[in-house]
Image (cartoon, rainbow, N blue to C red):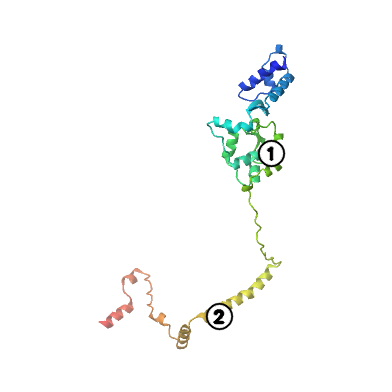
Amino acid sequence: MQIEQLKPIVEAALLAASQPMTVAQLGDLFAETDEVGHEQIARALEALAADCAGRGVELKEVASGFRYQVRQDVHPWISRMWTEKPSRYSRALLETLALIAYRQPITRPEIEQIRGVVVSSNIIKTLEEREWIRVVGYRDVPGKPALFGTTRAFLDYFNLKSLDQLPPLSEIRDMEDPQMGFEQTPLPARVIKDLPIDPDEELDAEAPAAEAATETAETAEVSEAPPHAADAATADTETGEPAAAEASAPREQPEPTTADEAAAPADVDDDTAAQHS
C-alpha cells in the first residue's frame, strides 16, 4: 500500500481512538493481504506530522503512542469550549509527585524525610486515582514500605514520551517564582560562654559571687527600711515587750480534741464569767 493511501487511514484511526495508539496497534488494523509493515506506518506518521505544520492541531508522540492534540498557542481560545475548569493542584501534591518522578522508586518515609513534613494520605490517594503513580515494589527494610513510581498516564498527561524528557533540576530551580522565595537575614552575633573543663571550679568561683550578692541585698533592705520602723524594733528588743501589733492581736484558741472539750466551755471563760457576776 502506498503512503498516500495509508495516511488517511492512520489519521482517521488516531482521531477515532480515545487513547494514543502505538505503531503495533495501528498495524493490527491491516490484514496480511494489505502488506503494510511497521516501517510504512512509521513513514505515514512522519508525513502526517509534517502536514500539521501551521495548523491548530499537531501529531504528538507520548508514552502510550501517537495522538492528535491542540497546539499550545491556540489552547487559550479552545479551552473556552470546556465548561469544566482545569484542576488546580496543591504545592504539596506537586512536590510529592516531583520527588516520585525524579527519584523513583521511592518510599513514603523517604519523601517525608526530604520534604521535612508528613505526606498526607489524601495526596497519595489522589495520585493513585489519577493513575499517575503505582506501587512498583517494596523496600527490604523493617515494615516493608511500598516503593512508588510513575506510570505512562503520568507521561501522557504531561506530554512526555519518556522520563528522559523531564527538565533537569537546574532548570526547575531557575523557573521558581521569585515571590515564593525569601531573603535569609543574617542573625546577630551571639557570644557563647565556654564551658569549664572542671565543673567544681565553676561552682567554687560562683560561691563568693553569690555570697557577695546576698550581703548587698541585705544591706539594701536595711537602708531602705523607714526610720521609725527601726526605732520600734530597737525599743522592743531593749524592753522585752512584744510589738504593738502582736499585743493587740487576739490569741488563737486551741481546737478541741475531744467531744467533751468541744461541748464544755474553756476554764478561763468560766473564771471570767464568775468575776463579772
Residue 205 lies, with reference to residue 99, above or below; the image says below
Q: Quick one: which residue is furthest to the bottom in this view? A: 239
Distance of mark 2 from mark 1, alpha carbons? 72 Å
- Which of the 4 image quadrants contains residue 122? top right
Could you tell me which quadrant the N terminus lies in? top right
Mark 2 vs mark 1, foreground winner is 1
Residue 135 lies, with reference to residue 208, above or below; the image says above
Label 2 or label 1, whichever comes before in sequence order = 1
Percent position (x, y) of residue 65?
Answer: 67, 26
Front-lying residue, 7 or 171: 7
Q: Residue at x 60, y 42 (%)?
A: 91
Q: Quick one: which residue is furthest to the front in this view? A: 54
Residue 237 lies, with reference to residue 24, above or below; the image says below
Percent position (x, y) of residue 120?
Answer: 58, 42
Residue 122 lies, with reference to residue 215, above or below; the image says above
Front-lying residue, 79 or 152: 79
Residue under circle 1? Answer: 102
* Residue type pointed to by label 2: Thr
Q: How many marks?
A: 2
Q: Residue at x 66, y 18 (%)?
A: 8
Q: Residue at x 30, y 78 (%)?
A: 270
Could you tell me which quadrant the C terminus lies in? bottom left
Residue under circle 2? Answer: 219
